[in-house]
Image (cartoon, rainbow, N blue to C red):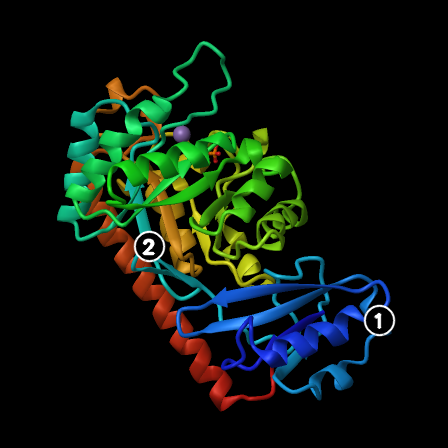
Amino acid sequence: MIVILNSRVGEDSPETRTILEYLRAKPGITPKIHQVVGTQQVLTEIYLVGDTSILDKREIENLSGVKRVVRVSRSYAVLGRHAGDSRSYGFNYNGVTFDQDSLNIFAGLCAVDTPEHVEQMLKAVSRAGMVCTRMGAYKPRTNPYSFQGHGANCLPWVFELAGKHGIKVIAMEITHENHIEEINTALEQAGNPTGVMLQVGTRNTQNFELLKQCGRQGRHPVLLKRGFGITLEESLNAAEYLASEGNRKVVFCLRGMKTNMGDPHRNFVDFSHVPVIKRMTHMPVCIDPSHSVGTRDGSPDRLLDSFHVTAQGVIAGANMVLVDFHPNPPTALVDGPQALVLEELEFFLEDIRIARNAYLERNALARKFHEANPGPA
Ligand code: PEP
Ligand code: MN
């Protein structure tokens, strides 16, 4: 159950104290207070853990300061969409808005290699008018002898270069909670020139201790990759771990499922789930065409499969695209064969614009239909 307070009622107000006292007096009920920083306003919500069936919804709604009480119908209490649930969605991080209406492109290196490549990449990103990128410093590798990423050593110059090129948000995978501290230290030392979205990779989707640590720190948003071999429900529960620990700034990323049914793609592309996640939760949805397709193969129409699946995800309403580029893929230390080259960036972005406009048109068409036909769902 979620108790939503009026927008003027803050965490420390007398009304909140009275409401908490009332709730704490109920047997077996633990209230947890959350500040929801939306793009429009800050809301205070109280999440009730325990057997809430003993509670009288009306009685709580009559308490001073309470706007509404939502009975949680699914296990994704914080991130899920519930009946009659019109809470504000999305968040703003370092000047960039992430919600279910926006679209942000994160083109960048799968793995940081040299300062020259990072600079060439960031120049291309900022020349294209973008403020987000991806830069892998900690790489989880299948083979223990493969390059594991430069780790903390590269952070000072990566952050400095990002600041120089006006980058606001870098998606950066972490594989251990210590990496959060390393990132924070490097950001402080560089004078916070940029922001970091902590990426939890598909191999760590159910690393619950890592999720809890990412959830407890409220500073950085989290990009959670869907687990490649678990159900959607299990991956959404993993996202809920982040939120239940206090961090609601979560973007959910589809990156394909591991099965030979997807051959010849590296993974079976699952972007048809974009609208499903948006229906079931409040999370913005990201698609990762690079790790889904995993090749530079193209069709006779001269569009690469990765372009096609990106367009398919964007036309279905995706809110973020995470994509591998490299100035010189044959020299890339990780995932060179799937990287797009810098010369393709404008082409890729224009193709996305076409798909995005088609999505917006489809959206307007649906609105028109439902205004004229209020009956059908
Ligand atoms: C990545 O984005 O670099 C990555 C390793 O992705 P995934 O966790 O989806 O395999
Ligand atoms: Mn990769």
**Is 320 placed left or right of 211 in the picture?**
left
Along the line of sight, the residue nearer the viewer: 316 or 20? 20
In this view, the residue in front, 308 or 36, is 36
Q: Is residue 333 left or right of residue 342?
A: right
Q: Which is more N-terminal, label 1 or label 2? A: 1
Name the kind of residue labelled 2 in the image. Answer: Asn
Query: Disc number at residue 233?
Result: none
- Front residue (pair 231, 166): 166
Quadrant (top left, top right, bottom left, bottom right) of the C terminus: bottom right
Per the image, the residue denoted by label 2 is: 104
Q: Is label 2 in a helix, a strand or a loop?
A: strand
- x 38%, y 39%: residue: 184
Does the rendering let one see residue 377?
Answer: no
Instruction: Tell me if residue 251 comes above or below residue 341 in the rendering.
Output: below
Residue occupying image coordinates x 27% and y 46%: 194
Q: Quadrant of the N terminus?
A: bottom right
Report the disc number at residue 53. 1
Indicate which quadrant contains ligand 2: top left
Q: Nearer the viewer, mark 2 or mark 1?
A: 1
How crowded is the residue under tag 1: few (<14 C-alpha within 10 Å), some, or many (20+)?
A: few
Tell me the CA gap for discs 2 and 1.
41 Å
Q: Secondary structure at mark 1?
A: helix
Disc 1 residue type (three-letter) = Ser
Q: Residue 10: x and y, percent?
A: 53, 75
Few, some or many C-alpha atoms within 10 Å of disc 2 (few <14, some 14-19, many ≥20)? some
